[in-house]
Image: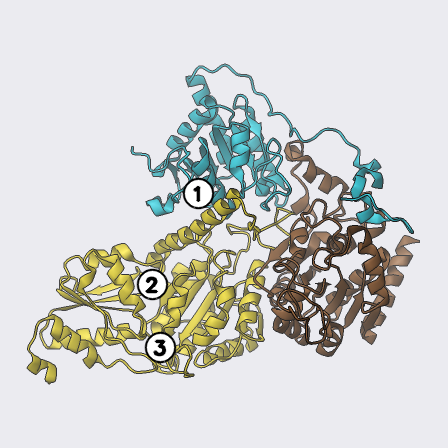
Amino acid sequence: MSLNYMVPVSKFKRYLPKDYVELVDYGPFGKEFSEVGTKNMGKYKELVEEHPMCSGCWMAYYIKIIFASLPNPEHTVTIGTAGCGRLAISQAAVPFIYGNYGDQNAMASGITRAFRLRFPDQQKDVITIAGDGGMMDIGFSMTMHAWFRGEKFTTIMLDNEVYGNTGGQESGMSIKGAVLKMSPKGKNFNKMPAMQLAITAGCVYVVKMSPTNINKAAKAIRRAIFAARELGPTFIHAYTSCNIEYSIPTPDVFKDAQEMAKGRFAFEEFMTDEAKDLFTVVEAKKKKEVS
Amino acid sequence: MSKKITVGPVGYMPQSAPSMGVELSPEGKALLYGNIVEEEEAMRDAAKALLTMDNPTIFPGPMVLWDWRDDVAEKSAAILDLASEIPNCKIIPMPDYRPKYPKIDVKAEINPNHPNLTILDNKIKACVFIGVHCHYANLTLRMIRAGTACYTVAMCAEMGHEEAMASIRDVHAADVLRFRDIIIEVRNELGIEYTTTMPPENPSLPKEDWGALTPSDYGEYRSLIMSKKGEHVTAVE
Amino acid sequence: MSLNKKLVDMDYLLNEAPREQHFITGAQAMAEAVKRASVDMAIAYPITPQSEVMHLVGDIYAQGHIKEYYRAEEELGTMSAIAGAARGGVRMFTATSGPGLLRGLEAIVSWPGHRIPCVLGVLTRVVNAPLSIQPDNIEMAYLMHSGMIMLHAENQQDTFDYTLAAFAITEKVDVYIPVSVSTEGFFVTHAKGYVDMMSEELAFDVIDPYKAPVPAMDNEVPPARIQRDAPVQKSNFMSYLIHSVWQQEIWDSNRRAMKYVYQYLGGPIEVIHPDADVFIVASGCAAAQGREANRYAEEEGLSVGFIKVKCIRPWPKDEISAALKNAKAVIVPEHNIIGWLSKEIQASIPNGGIVVEGPRVYGGMTLPVELIMEQIYIALGMDSEKLQA
């Protein structure tokens, strides 16, 4: 279908709040990535603006990148769970489902299949965005099984290595030895190998990164969405520090992310041969369109 | 007629209209103060409220604000016609259903999660909801009845709303125009002199050129959006 | 639908369409109803005694009556996926039993608040421990406070009819909350009974995802900035108020379903011998035994009334209290230890003391008619000789 559902009835446009009129006139809906996207952030009406995240929150920054990277925001649904991330995600001008604890990938399995039944000719992107606790602890079974089943949607894990929203408890993604709430003597087992689990479970495209480079982060997100449309589950494991629970001074948040990019979040990209072929086609097409 | 549902404020913890025994009207009928009546009777009472109470306002919801179906334009035009016949009428939209963050602009919009803020700030004593999905309409109407002194009219495309003082069901464009005609009729009966006037546009719409926006417009948050290579911002909260 | 069915409304399908008699199990009856309900998608996860239902639903998917079907990871995954798919605007079905229901309960109890229309089959089973697969309907007690609509089928015929009706009720704009159809595991699911069914060429009208009290989450309906599941956890009065009126709305929706229970099931209760002094009130399988006890009593020339409760939620308080207005004793046979039905009845009448709490069987025990007869004799003040006999 067209963009009609987000275009105001012409006679009512002068009665709408400014925010909505601008979203339609200057927002990214129905526009090419080259016109809007991450490269032009700050120059158009973005999908996430005001949000209640902490000052200096690296997760909020990455969420803005996710929404600026969407290839098709007018046909995208995001799904999340309890955690800091959803405070910003729910402020985006994209439908967001706030389900129960850790159930995002099960819910996405249902809605992705429903969309494919109802709209066989219209690509609808489904993206789950949840934290390390929601994805790898409480939602572990549903995350893994959605991947094993080959469900065609994108999973993005915002890994801050702690339960930030509930006040700083140990998560499966915390590193061994970390002294956190509920691990008063230090965590006594290793950080879970999320990337390897995703590859083993059948994700066709998997990236681990500390998103310090906006364009690189956007490229990974877009690749994950394109591959999920055609091939199967995709997974992005991104470092999004919690400067509160890990006491990172706000001015040092970026430095910390850069250090992580050299350390345990060093950029790693896995793709199947089919995904590689797909990206060659998709990315060549885009270059041609631009030139 | 005993009024089962009355203009609020009914208090801190409202009892829901269905739990007080109010049932939705059957096809062809309307609800007035919780009682099943003829549509015309409900419309006339609603018209009187909109013509005699302070700051009458029409709250159009998403289903009539956005051009998503072929029949929307006609219905929306009819709503504007209706508004133009009510003296001093405002249009304040309910564009979506998510709670507003950080703070609602009560002059510019209404939200189903905290509708009373808009009603109270604008001192609205009579209003019409139209084009709102039923779940959110029920929440809104009940919260308004709980905490404000506002006469509510629900013009519903489906089965109507127990919580409203006047509830009209199965509303299409023609029904909105019929209500407009009744407004004019009652207005004349009341001897109110009036010339058709369009409501004022949304107060949140000062001219601003977003096309010329630059990163510096983001002030101190600019660095979080797009820091320059090598840039190190220290002056943040 | 690929099978070229004739789509009809539920009134015609349930009440007018010609039927033919079949001799089938309760599990088959439920699956046959699903076959005629234009279900888009079903999600399965095994648990005894439910599994049989979703096996058969899988078969009808393979035959093309359903468009999508898969086996999920476990019940929480199943129930969550249902919530996702239903938001996407498709008609959904699944079924579960006892411990499976409890495993999925976190998602299930959030369905009404999320305004998820769907039908859940509950083929009852004991809740562990110790582990057992036998029939016992204690899990229904956990659903009674969830806000969902609950129908309780007495036999195979009810299972078929109630399941079909459930699909119509759940999608009514003024209801739009899930409907569960319960019946006893094994006693009904694995036993055959006569079921009158309409032709499978007929099917219920397909779902219209835009005839709903909430927007479908499909990017085809406004608003653009949709937020169906408002996060209202802020600590302020407005957050408390929106949550409280939201909860009211769910129970109001539940209440509004009653008119459809009349429309499709002929009312929430069935009454035999309304003028009797002693009543048997029962639901589900216990109603079948209660009905039999009522027949025994009739043969013995005793005046005993019988009330079958078809719908547990919305609870037919007014109907039951009116039917028991002149009762002197009320016997409530049940298949669970806590007696959730007798507690509801006690709370529905001014003279709750007349309710005999039982007889109850549980853990898989059958409910012999004699147990009910014994209570009838006691209630009628008959001598102990009769009791011995």
Q: In the rendering, which numbered label is found on residue C311?
A: 2
What chain is colored yellow? C
The reply, left or right, for residue A78 in relation to residue A44 is left
Which image quadrant for residue C284? bottom left
- State the image coordinates of residue C362 (x, y, percent, origin top left): 32, 79
Relative side of A184 to C35, left or right: right
Disc 3 secondary structure class? loop
Q: Amino acid at mark 1?
A: Gly
Q: Quick one: which chain is cyan?
A: B
Q: Which residue is mark 3?
A: C136
Amino acid type at circle 3 is: Asp
Q: CA distance from mark 3 to mark 1?
A: 41 Å
- Would you call the spot at circle 3 few (<14 residues within 10 Å), some (14-19), or many (20 or more)? many
**In the rendered image of this protein, which colour is used for chain A?**
brown
Is the residue A42 above or below the residue A174 in the image? Answer: above
Give the letter of the chain under mark 2. Answer: C
Percent coordinates x, y for residue C254 in the rendering:
40, 55
Residue type pointed to by label 2: Cys
The verdict on a common chain for dots 1 and 2 is no
